[in-house]
Image (spheres, grey):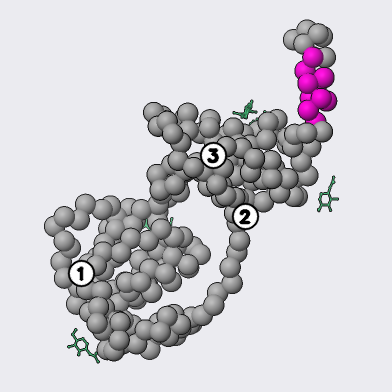
Amino acid sequence: MDLKFISTFLCFVLLHSSKTFGDHFTNQSDLETYIVHLEFPDQLFSNSKDLLLWHQSFLPTNSNNSSRILYSYRHVFNGFAATLSSDEVREMEKKPGFVSARPQRIFQLHTTHTPSFLGLHQNVGLWNASNSGKGVLIGILDTGIDPQHPSFNDNGMPNLPLKWKGKCEFNVTTYCNKKLIGARNYVQPDRFPLDLAGHGTHTSSTAGGNFVDDANFFW
Ligand SMILES: *[C@@H]1O[C@H](CO)[C@@H](O)[C@H](O)[C@H]1NC(C)=O
Ligand SMILES: *[C@@H]1O[C@H](CO)[C@@H](O)[C@H](O)[C@H]1NC(C)=O
Ligand SMILES: *[C@@H]1O[C@H](CO)[C@@H](O)[C@H](O)[C@H]1NC(C)=O
Ligand SMILES: *[C@@H]1O[C@H](CO)[C@@H](O)[C@H](O)[C@H]1NC(C)=O
Ligand SMILES: *[C@@H]1O[C@H](CO)[C@@H](O)[C@H](O)[C@H]1NC(C)=O
């Protein structure tokens, strides 16, 4: 690199430093994780690399794109998760194709008595009228699942539907049964879909778990 190039580069950085919000000028403690929702593109991207480049174009120039984007989404909706400052989000809002940016939030638990919270009662009303959801396959994207939880015992469950082609990717083959019929880790495919946080076990047992007698919070 000769001297002329270096000085040109420095001028470029100086000229732009007041307008852009690059990594070198962003106070790292202002960064938060956002989920950014974009419009579906007019043209279809033939490969995911082009789509990722389009996602990166929403980031401030000067930032290290590869370290800012945590996930790029393209199946259910178009967008990405990235660490951004609120100033950077305001800049991003001006770009065509932007829909919304929502900061990550941690919610407090509301209840451990979810059926009553939802107004459901055994043997009456909606729960009874729907035959407790008999025959319904439930798919849940969450923090994982604890296959040894008593809610996933398969007492009284019928055989798996023949059309079922799902995977059960635990390291113990008996973890899946006629109640918990499949599980997969989509975040880190080399890891098991076990639940270290408890949330996925809670939501999936709420949606489709078996009845457990004398359950309480500290079972
Ligand atoms: C970064 O932001 C934090 C919190 O807003 C503040 O306490 C800190 O002094 C800032 N650091 C710099 C270098 O501006
Ligand atoms: C980040 O992406 C933008 C837009 O695609 C590009 O102009 C810039 O050079 C990229 N920066 C890095 C460090 O890759
Ligand atoms: C950008 O971030 C990636 C991932 O954190 C890192 O490997 C790479 O060295 C960084 N590049 C620069 C120019 O800082
Ligand atoms: C519960 O459902 C069954 C069958 O769907 C029905 O025959 C019965 O009347 C329902 N019980 C109540 C209390 O609604
Ligand atoms: C399965 O994986 C879990 C988590 O990595 C580990 O704690 C457990 O010992 C493994 N069990 C077997 C039978 O390999």
Residue 145 appears anywhere in the view = yes
Q: Is residue 59 left or right of residue 173?
A: right
Pointer 3: residues within 10 angstroms few (<14), some, or many (20+)? Answer: some
Q: Name the residue rendered at 71%, 49% in the picture.
A: 86
Pointer 1: residues within 10 angstroms few (<14), some, or many (20+)? Answer: few
Res 153 → quadrant: bottom left
Residue 185 magenta-drawn?
no
- Along the line of sight, which residue is nearer the eye, 79 or 176? 79
Q: Position of residue 55 (x, y in %)?
A: 54, 36
The answer to whether the residues at label 1 and label 3 have Cβ atoms under 8 Å apart is no
State which mark lies toward you, 1 or 3.
Answer: 3
* Span highlighted in magenta in the image: 8-17
- Tell me the residue that label 2 is attached to: 103
- Tell me the residue that label 1 is attached to: 135
Res 1 → quadrant: top right
Q: Which element type, helix, strand or loop, lies under badge 2?
A: strand
- Is label 1's Cβ within 8 Å of ligand 4? no
State which mark lies toward you, 3 or 2.
Answer: 3
Q: Position of residue 28 (x, y in %)?
A: 75, 45
Q: Position of residue 25 (x, y in %)?
A: 79, 37
Q: Is residue 161 left or right of residue 195?
A: left
The answer to whether the residues at label 3 and label 2 have Cβ atoms under 8 Å apart is no
- Tell me the residue that label 3 is attached to: 97
Q: Which element type, helix, strand or loop, lies under badge 3?
A: loop
- Is label 2's Cβ within 8 Å of ligand 1? no
Q: From mark 3 to mark 2, how far is it between C-alphas?
A: 19 Å
Quick one: label 2 or label 1, which is nearer the N terminus?
2
Q: Taken as a whole, is the magenta stretch helix, strand or loop? A: helix
Quick one: label 3 or label 2, which is nearer the N terminus?
3
